[in-house]
Image (spheres, helix red, strand yellow):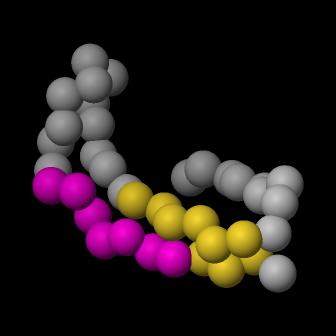
Amino acid sequence: MVEWTPQNKGLYFIETFVWDPNAVPLASKGPIMLVLVT
């Protein structure tokens, strides 16, 4: 799990990836989520 606290208001996007310790992708890119911080 990754914790994230935005410092500014605005629209952000989050992409999910699964990597092994050697930075080799283990799966296709996951869905993109939009987060609106007001």
Q: Residue at x 63, y 72 (%)?
A: 11
Would you place residue 34 above or below residue 21 in this image? below
Q: Residue furthest front?
A: 10
Residue 27, position as x, y percentages in the image: 15, 50
Would you place residue 15 above or below residue 18 in this image? below
Q: Residue at x 27, y 30 (%)?
A: 20
Would you place residue 33 above or below residue 19 in this image? below
Would you place residue 26 above or below residue 33 in this image? above
**Residue 21's image quarter?**
top left
Depth check, front residue: 30 or 6 = 6
Q: Residue at x 37, y 70 (%)?
A: 32
Name the quarter where the C terminus is drawn.
Answer: bottom right
Residue 14, position as x, y percentages in the image: 48, 62
User: In the image, is 33 to the left or to the right of 19?
Assistant: right
Q: Residue at x 78, y 56 (%)?
A: 5
Q: Residue furthest top?
A: 22
**Callout count:** 0
Residue 37, position as x, y percentages in the image: 75, 76
Residue span colored magenta = 28-34
Residue 10, position as x, y percentages in the image: 72, 71
Is 1 a magenta residue? no
User: In the image, is 15 to the left or to the right of 31?
Assistant: right
